[in-house]
Amino acid sequence: MECDQAATGTERVTFKPPRPPGWPLERVLHLMAGTVVLTSATLAYLFGPLWLILTGFVGASLLLDASVGWCPASLVLYRLGIRTSAECGLHRASRIP
């Protein structure tokens, strides 16, 4: 809800639906990891087991993310402008009057 001041001094209240801030970085990271794992498993089934190295890399990145709090993909996504869930929460909290 926002208040607009008209030239006459009266206050007009307009209701606007909240704009979704988009997916947070953590959600995009899990989406990417799942997609890469399923793709590499399919490629391993179709073309050979060497594609499982890619699955191992994704697993190692997820372990690194769980233990340290970051992984190479999260750094790239953050530089691309995808906000973390904490930043999305701050954005959402700043809109509430």
Image: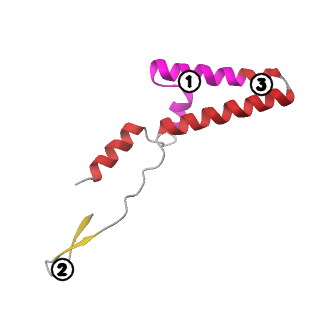
Q: In percent of the image, x 61 and y 32: which residue is there?
A: 33
Q: In percent of the image, x 37 and y 58: which residue is there?
A: 18
Say what amino acid the circle numbered 1 marks.
Answer: Leu
Going from N to C along the chain, the mark reached first, 2 or 3, is 2
Which of discs 1 and 2 lies nearer the camera? The answer is 1
Which residues, given as a range, are shown in magenta? 54-77
Q: Is residue 12 above or below residue 85?
A: below
Q: Residue 6 has which mark?
A: none
Q: Which of 84 and 37 is in front in this view?
A: 37
Say what amino acid the circle numbered 2 marks.
Answer: Ala
Q: Label 1, label 3: how many angstroms apart (C-alpha)?
A: 18 Å
Q: Nearer the viewer, residue 69 or 35?
A: 35
Q: Where is residue 84 drawn, in percent x and y? A: 43, 38
Q: In this view, does 5 lie above or below 31?
A: below
Is residue 37 found left or right of 23 in the rendered image? Answer: right
Q: Determine the secondary structure under disc 2.
A: loop
Say whether residue 22 is magenta: no
Q: Residue 51 has which mark?
A: 3
Q: Residue 62 has which mark?
A: 1
Going from N to C along the chain, the mark reached first, 1 or 2, is 2
Say what amino acid the circle numbered 3 marks.
Answer: Trp
Report the residue marked by disc 2: 7
**Badge 2: how crowded within 10 Å, few (<14), some, or many (20+)?**
few
Q: Where is residue 54 drawn, in percent x and y? A: 70, 24
